[in-house]
Amino acid sequence: MGGQKQPSKTIDDLRRDLEIVLVNLRWIEEATGETLEGEDAFIVKQIEDENKAALANSQESTT
C-alpha cells in the first residue's frame, strides 16, 4: 500500500550493532596480533568515539 515503510531498526539498534562489529574487530586484532594502521585506524577510532558519545547521550535522555 502507499504508506511510508517503517524502518526495521532504530538508530539505537544500529549503534549497538556497530558496537558489536567494533568489538569483534578488536578481538580479531588481538587474536591475530595485527592492528589497523593509518587512515583505517583513525576512522575506526573516530567511529568508536562517536558511537560511545551517542550511546551516552541516548542513555542520559532515557533517565
Image (cartoon, grey):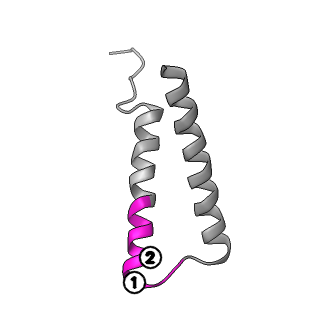
- Could you say which quadrant of the image residue 60 lies in? top right
Say what secondary structure mark 1 lies in.
Answer: helix
For label 1, the residue is 32
- Left or right of 28 in this view: 60: right
- Could you say which quadrant of the image residue 13 lies in? top left
Relative height, residue 26 to residue 47 (above, below): below
- Magenta span main SS: helix
Q: Nearer the viewer, residue 31 or 4?
A: 31
Relative height, residue 42 to residue 7 (above, below): below
Relative height, residue 29 to residue 4 (above, below): below
The stretch drawn in magenta includes residue 57: no
- Left or right of 63 in this view: 27: left
For label 2, the residue is 29
Q: Residue at x 55, y 45 (%)?
A: 52
Q: Residue at x 44, y 85 (%)?
A: 33
Where residue 34 appears, as percent x and y from the top left, is: 48, 83
Q: Which residues are magenta?
A: 23-35
Say what secondary structure mark 2 lies in.
Answer: helix
